[in-house]
Amino acid sequence: MRLPLPGFRDLYPEDCAQRLHIAAAFRKIMGRFAFEEYDGPVLEPLELFEDKSGPEVAEQLFRFEDRGGRPVALRPEMTPTLARMVGARCQSLRKPIRWCAVGEQFRYERPQKGRLRSFLQLNGDILGESEFRADGELIASLLSTFLELGLGPDHIALRLSDRLLWGILLEQFPGIDGEGVLRAIDRSAKESPEAIGEALRAALGVASDKFIAAWSRLSECKSMDALRKFFSPFPKAAVRLTQWSGLLEFLGAMGLGGFVTIDLSVVRGLAYYTGFVFEIFERNGAGRALAGGGRYDDLVEKLGGPSLPACGFAIGDVVLSNVLAEKNLFGGGSATLDLWVAFGEGEQANGGLAMAAAARAAGFSVSYDLRSHVAIDRQLRQAARSGARFALIDNLSGGWRIKNLSTGEAIGCDEKNFISIWFAICKKSELAIGGDRKF
Amino acid sequence: MRLPLPGFRDLYPEDCAQRLHIAAAFRKIMGRFAFEEYDGPVLEPLELFEDKSGPEVAEQLFRFEDRGGRPVALRPEMTPTLARMVGARCQSLRKPIRWCAVGEQFRYERPQKGRLRSFLQLNGDILGESEFRADGELIASLLSTFLELGLGPDHIALRLSDRLLWGILLEQFPGIDGEGVLRAIDRSAKESPEAIGEALRAALGVASDKFIAAWSRLSECKSMDALRKFFSPFPKAAVRLTQWSGLLEFLGAMGLGGFVTIDLSVVRGLAYYTGFVFEIFERNGAGRALAGGGRYDDLVEKLGGPSLPACGFAIGDVVLSNVLAEKNLFGGGSATLDLWVAFGEGEQANGGLAMAAAARAAGFSVSYDLRSHVAIDRQLRQAARSGARFALIDNLSGGWRIKNLSTGEAIGCDEKNFISIWFAICKKSELAIGGDRKF
């Protein structure tokens, strides 16, 4: 018996239910925030990703030639596809564009805890609006998604940072390799201080000690007051700090202020961010980011699309699933069966099938033994094993009864009055019956 | 600006909404039939599919070597993955196993109407039960899925056939190539009578005229009486015909008899079917099958799994979407916005954000202008363009009002009483408000 490829998962029903739970939460919250869902191909022309997503992603592509000789790749992220789609219809799309995608992404990385080669990702993006309320609305949708899944401000923090403030700081060190500095800082959570110092020295040259001291002080700024004090020597920062206050007030007004920590040590590795950037981490420290994003005002045009300010985030399901499982936030797992039908033979059995069909048409989940000639008692033992809440049982002497399998309470019925009696039982029952019933 | 690969689709929100509508119907109905959803990797070891899925599928694989030198392929179907998953846990899984999957499949075919290189497919399978009720339950779930999407017995027919009856007929022609015959018949919908006759003659040799006459008569059998008459010379067929009656009665008892037509010209191309086989077609004739399936009692073991009787079906989304669109069965399309918030500046704006957050927390979709300093009137014109049903409007003089944007009716509120007034309006309103509100 063969195994899945390294970094890929067989999702048995209990695992699949967890992924569906996450995907449903993604869609529910993004809908409330008035995002529309789009999707693109899982397989794309290689050129769409090459040279565009930074060296790290390019190294991690699943790429090959298809049978027509085209270089192709499994998508590692949505943004290039998003840029193409928005670009192709930019005139006709109402701005701002609020779009989200819930789809599979692929990266040829070394599989490890929290890192697989295929994963589900929610992408949320707002395009066509440069004001900070767009960043705020985007961050609010991201945080509300975590809230919906049971992760509140006690569990997770959003670390907010800013490429614009970083740019103002870097301007004070003329001649240094700003990109190299930001990449080194981005790795600072993953590498040793020596390695970071080394990378910073390589990027910075002679100014390194002075810069490292400034970096260290900036990373310690955890309040607006501290930020204002740090940037008081730089007049260009004043307007930007007003936007910072505005964004924090915005998130506070939405009741989401408890999630937010100011943390300028976050810079996000990818080169294309141009404004606010953020990552979500567990409060208790260790582990990879649960989500990240930021503003990328130049990227859509760079990818061949129109010039369109934009901000976006992505949440993957791998780290998220681990955290939800550790904290027991997945709930009951698989769906509960509403009704089990226990049949005799012949005409009566047909009546049972008709009632099963009626209950299903009304939205309930129904099952029964698929074999013929099985004694009612054995069928009822199966009903108990299935976890069904009720059983519809052939009396064999004509007529049926509906039995509550937890209380043992039963009430008679026939094929004609079954649905009304069943609905009455369901309404009366304090059991929360699952599914999508319609009454 | 680059294009998607041939045979792949950019799904804009209106197209994505259609795919989500289909996927939701798949999941809803399969849940009512007590199927549990599983999934496997989109990318699998090439060996999983080679030599196993018949020559046609093997030719159509998207295959390549990954960076670790492993031959891999994008999955063209679910069954090999299903066999692996069931095989790995066969002891602990309760039988019969009722599993379904809603996932993307990939085939390197020539793209054309109704045929793309990537498509969504619902797979339903019942494993571990050989009696015909399992076939019946499977077919019932398939037909109920079409019913849920609006396709009733007036629109579509299930053509029911049987590899076992075919086997009994083929036994009468010793020495002929039965597989070749069935493949030729399977292509009979797509090829000219001459080509089929040619293939049949190659497969059959001297017995061809007699066989072709029998084939022709069998294809004309459209009732149980006709089937019984045809097979009356063959005593082995009697038991099987009883199962035929049982299956038709079963589907009739569930109210699904109107879909079923007896049609022994259907044989299904793949070699692995062992009993009832079926395809779903539009009643009005032309076009590809909307779905197909059958019993495959030997396949799971052949794929390296346990010996387990099984039956299954698959529905793809491409032909289905075309049919639903032609018949106008997709409904309203994208979701309707429940509430638009029109703000002033300052403290009042924060109150508006708090009310927006409260409405969203109660399950409503809410949007607003992301720019500052936009006059209320302009914001309301945007609300109208957005299609929102209600607007929450800053009176600027303190206080707010909730306005029904179709009737113009408005009622005052403030931040404290907003949610109760909003709920009262929603309950009173005859507008069906979308989303997932919780009261």
Image: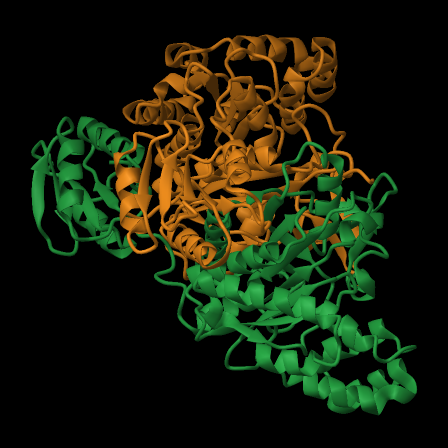
Chain colours: A green, B orange
| Residue displayed at 76% across by 39% down | B4
Q: List x then y, in percent, for residue B283.
A: 50, 13
Q: List x then y, in percent, for residue A259.
A: 49, 71
**Left or right: A138 with respect to A87?**
left
Asked whether residue A10 is in view, the answer is no
User: B344 and B193: which one is in front?
Assistant: B344
Quadrant containing the N terminus of chain B is top right
- Looking at the image, residue A353 lies above or below residue A79: above
User: A202 and B140: which one is in front?
Assistant: A202
Q: Answer with the quarter of the image where residue A438 lies.
A: top left
User: B280 and A316: which one is in front?
Assistant: A316
**Left or right: B183 with respect to B102?**
right
**Left or right: B30 with respect to B12?**
left
| Residue at the farthest front position | B397
| Residue displayed at 32% across by 50% down | B418
**Left or right: B252 with respect to A204?**
left
Q: Answer with the quarter of the image where residue B227 lies.
A: top left
| Residue displayed at 55% across by 75% down | A261
- Looking at the image, residue B41 lies above or below residue A345: below
Q: List x then y, in percent, for residue B229.
A: 41, 10
